[in-house]
C-alpha cells in the first residue's frame, strides 16, 4: 500500500455519487464502483435501473455484493488521509483552529470567537470592521477553559483568599474584598513552592525508604530475638521437664524400695514362724505317740529320748510396721525446688545480661534537686545535706520531696541504669514522667506518673495503689532499673545477686520519662547519710 498511497489520488477511491471515499463499495455489471448505500438510494429514486456514470440500463435491479478487495483498499486509504491531515504544529505552540489539512501555528486567539488563528485566517479580523472590535490576545489553547463562566471574560487574576482564578469583573462582585493578584505573580509563587516540593519530595522519599529499612531491620531483629528466646526457653523447659521426670522417678523408686523392704521383712518373719510351727508340730506328734505307751519301761526310755523343745521367739513383741512416707514427697519437691532455683538463677542472670546492654549514661540535674540535696560535681551522686539552701526559685525544682531527676529523658525504646544503695537504710528510685507535679504533696504512684521502688525498714515496696510489699533482700548493694517504653515495662534487679526483684507491667507512658532518685533523710547520728550513686554497668560473665 505504500506505493498506492504515493501514486493514487483520493479520486481513485471516491464514490461518484457522494464524492467521498468508498464506504462498503459495490461494483455494477458495467464495471463502475459506488458506495452500497449511495447506489441503493439512487435506484430507489429512478424508474429504470441504470449506471449513474455510463447510463447503462439494467432490466432488473442488480443484486450487488460488496467488493471486498476495493473495500480494504478504501479503508487503508481513509486511514492514510487521517494521518496525512494531522496538525503539523511544533510542541508548545497553539495550532490554528481554522486550518484544514496541515494546521499552521496560530499567531492570535480571539476572546470573542473563542478561536485561534494563523496569519492567513486572521486576515478577516484585521480587515472587517465588525471583527476588528474583537479582543485579540497571544495564542492560547483551550480558550473555553480560560474564560470566566459567569462574566464571559478572560481569567487574568488569582484570588488568594479562595484560591481560584477570577476575571476583572469577579473582583468587583463576589471577590471584592479578597486578596487578588495577577496570574503571573501567583504562578511565580506557586512555581517557587513547586520547586521546593520537587527538592523536598526526593528527600522525603529517601527518609521513608530509610524508615522502611529500619522497620524491616527491627522485624528481622525481633524475629531473631524471638528465635533465640524460644531456643533458650526450650532448653530451660526441657531441663525442667527432665528434673521433674527424674524427681518423679526417684520418688517412685524410694516408695517402691520401702514397700519392698517391708515385704522382705514380713516374708522372713513368716518363714521363721512357719519353721517354728513345723518343729512344734513334730514335737506334738512325738509326745502324742509316747503318751499312748502303757509299758512303764518303754515309756520312761522313750520319754528320756524325747528331744528338748525347739527354741522359739516371744512373738508377742514382734510387729510388722508399714513404712512411713511422711516427708518423702516433700523432700523430693525440696530437691526439685533447689534445681528450679538454680535454673531460675541462671535465667535471671541471662535476663540481667540482656537488659544491661541498654545502659544509658545519666547525670543528675541540679535545677530539679530539692534545696537540701547535695550533688557531686560529676552529677553521679546525691545525698541529703540536712539543711535547705537558699536557691533561686525554679519551676523544675522539687519543694516538698527531696527528689532529683536526671538531665536525660526518654520517650521511646529501652534503657537501663544502676544505682548503688550500699550503706543506706532509706532510699527510693525508679522513673517518673517529665511533667510530674514538683511543688505539691501527692500520692507518688503510677497514676501520678511515678514508677519507683522504696526501701524502708524491713521491706522493699513498689509504690502503687495498693502498694506491693517485697521482702528486703539481704546484702542488697546495687539496684538495676530497666524500662521498655514501648512495652510499658519497668523492672528492678538486685545486681550483685543477679536476681529479679519486681516488674511493673502494662504501664501507660504518654510522655518522656526521667530517672528519679530519693536519697532519704539522715538522722543526727548520721544514719542513712551515704549517697545514692549512679554506677557504671559492669557486665560479669
Image (spheres, rainbow, N blue to C red):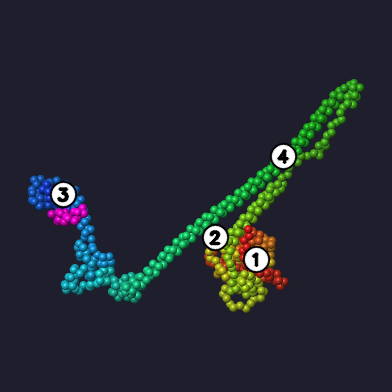
Give SS at disc 3.
Answer: strand
Residue 204 picture location, percent across and down: 43, 65
Point out the tag, 2 or 1, that comes first from the N-terminus.
Answer: 1
Mark found first going from the N terminus, 4 or 2: 4
User: Label 4 belongs to which residue?
Assistant: 260
Residue 159 visible in the displayed image = no
Q: Residue furthest right?
A: 297
Could you give the CA–CA distance between mark 4 and mark 2, rounded to whole angstroms?
Answer: 57 Å
Residue 407 seen in the figure: yes
Count of all numbered marks drawn on residues in the image: 4
Question: Whole-Å distance between the Cαs marked 3 and 1?
Answer: 109 Å
**Res 401 quadrant in image:** bottom right
Dividing the picture into quarters, in which one does residue 472 lie? Answer: bottom right
In front: mark 2 or mark 1? Answer: 1
Q: Which residue is mark 2?
A: 487
Relative to 226, 501 lies left or right:
right
Amino acid at each position: 500500500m505504500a506505493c498506492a498511497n504515493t501514486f493514487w489520488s483520493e479520486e481513485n477511491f471516491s464514490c461518484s455519487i457522494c464524492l467521498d471515499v468508498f464506504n462498503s463499495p459495490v461494483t455494477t455489471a458495467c464495471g463502475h464502483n459506488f458506495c452500497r448505500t449511495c447506489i441503493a438510494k439512487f435506484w430507489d429514486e429512478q424508474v429504470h435501473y441504470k449506471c449513474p456514470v455510463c447510463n447503462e440500463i439494467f432490466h432488473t435491479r442488480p443484486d450487488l455484493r460488496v467488493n471486498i478487495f476495493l473495500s480494504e483498499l478504501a479503508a487503508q486509504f481513509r486511514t492514510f488521509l487521517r494521518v496525512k491531515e494531522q496538525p503539523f504544529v511544533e510542541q508548545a505552540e497553539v495550532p490554528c483552529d481554522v486550518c484544514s489539512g496541515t494546521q499552521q501555528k496560530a499567531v492570535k486567539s480571539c476572546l470573542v470567537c473563542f478561536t485561534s488563528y494563523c496569519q492567513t485566517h486572521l486576515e478577516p479580523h484585521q480587515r472587517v470592521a465588525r471583527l476588528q472590535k474583537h479582543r485579540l490576545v497571544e495564542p492560547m489553547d483551550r480558550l473555553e477553559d480560560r474564560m470566566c463562566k459567569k462574566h464571559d471574560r478572560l481569567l487574568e487574576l488569582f484570588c488568594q483568599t479562595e484560591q481560584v482564578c477570577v476575571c476583572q469583573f469577579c473582583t468587583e462582585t463576589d471577590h471584592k474584598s479578597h486578596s487578588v493578584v495577577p496570574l503571573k505573580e501567583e504562578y511565580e509563587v506557586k512555581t517557587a513552592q513547586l520547586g521546593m516540593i520537587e527538592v523536598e519530595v526526593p528527600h522525603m522519599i529517601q527518609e521513608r525508604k530509610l524508615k522502611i529499612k529500619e522497620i524491616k531491620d527491627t522485624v528481622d531483629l525481633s524475629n531473631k530475638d524471638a528465635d533465640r528466646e524460644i531456643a533458650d526457653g526450650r532448653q530451660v523447659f526441657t531441663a525442667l521437664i527432665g528434673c521433674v521426670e527424674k524427681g518423679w522417678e526417684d520418688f517412685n523408686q524410694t516408695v517402691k524400695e520401702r514397700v519392698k523392704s517391708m515385704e522382705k521383712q514380713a516374708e522372713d518373719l513368716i518363714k521363721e514362724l512357719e519353721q517354728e510351727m513345723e518343729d512344734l508340730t513334730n514335737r506334738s506328734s512325738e509326745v502324742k505317740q509316747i503318751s499312748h505307751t502303757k509299758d512303764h519301761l518303754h515309756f520312761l526310755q522313750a520319754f528320756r529320748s524325747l528331744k528338748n523343745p525347739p527354741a522359739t521367739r516371744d512373738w508377742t513383741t514382734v510387729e510388722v510396721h508399714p513404712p512411713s512416707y511422711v516427708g518423702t514427697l516433700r523432700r523430693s519437691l525440696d530437691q526439685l525446688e533447689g534445681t528450679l532455683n538454680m535454673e531460675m538463677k541462671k535465667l535471671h542472670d541471662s535476663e540481667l545480661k540482656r537488659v544491661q546492654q541498654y545502659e544509658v549514661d545519666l547525670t543528675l540535674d541540679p535545677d530539679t534537686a530539692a534545696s537540701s540535696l547535695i550533688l557531686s560535681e560529676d552529677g553521679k551522686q546525691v545525698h541529703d545535706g540536712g539543711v535547705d539552701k537558699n536557691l533561686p526559685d525554679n519551676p523544675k525544682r522539687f519543694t516538698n520531696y527531696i527528689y532529683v531527676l536526671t538531665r536525660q529523658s526518654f520517650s521511646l525504646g529501652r534503657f537501663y541504669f544502676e544505682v548503688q544503695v550500699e550503706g543506706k537504710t532509706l532510699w527510693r528510685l525508679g522513673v517518673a514522667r517529665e511533667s510530674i507535679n514538683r511543688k505539691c504533696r501527692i500520692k507518688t504512684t503510677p497514676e501520678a506518673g511515678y514508677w519507683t521502688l522504696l526501701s524502708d525498714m524491713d521491706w522493699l515496696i513498689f509504690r502503687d495503689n495498693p502498694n506491693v510489699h517485697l521482702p528486703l533482700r539481704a546484702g542488697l548493694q546495687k539496684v538495676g532499673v530497666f524500662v521498655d517504653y514501648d512495652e510499658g515495662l519497668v523492672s528492678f534487679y538486685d545486681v550483685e545477686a543477679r536476681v529479679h526483684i519486681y516488674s511493673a507491667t502494662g504501664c501507660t507512658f504518654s510522655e518522656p520519662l526521667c530517672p528519679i532518685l530519693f536519697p532519704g533523710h539522715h538522722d543526727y547520728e548520721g544514719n542513712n547519710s551515704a549517697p545514692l550513686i549512679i554506677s557504671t554497668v559492669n557486665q560479669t560473665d
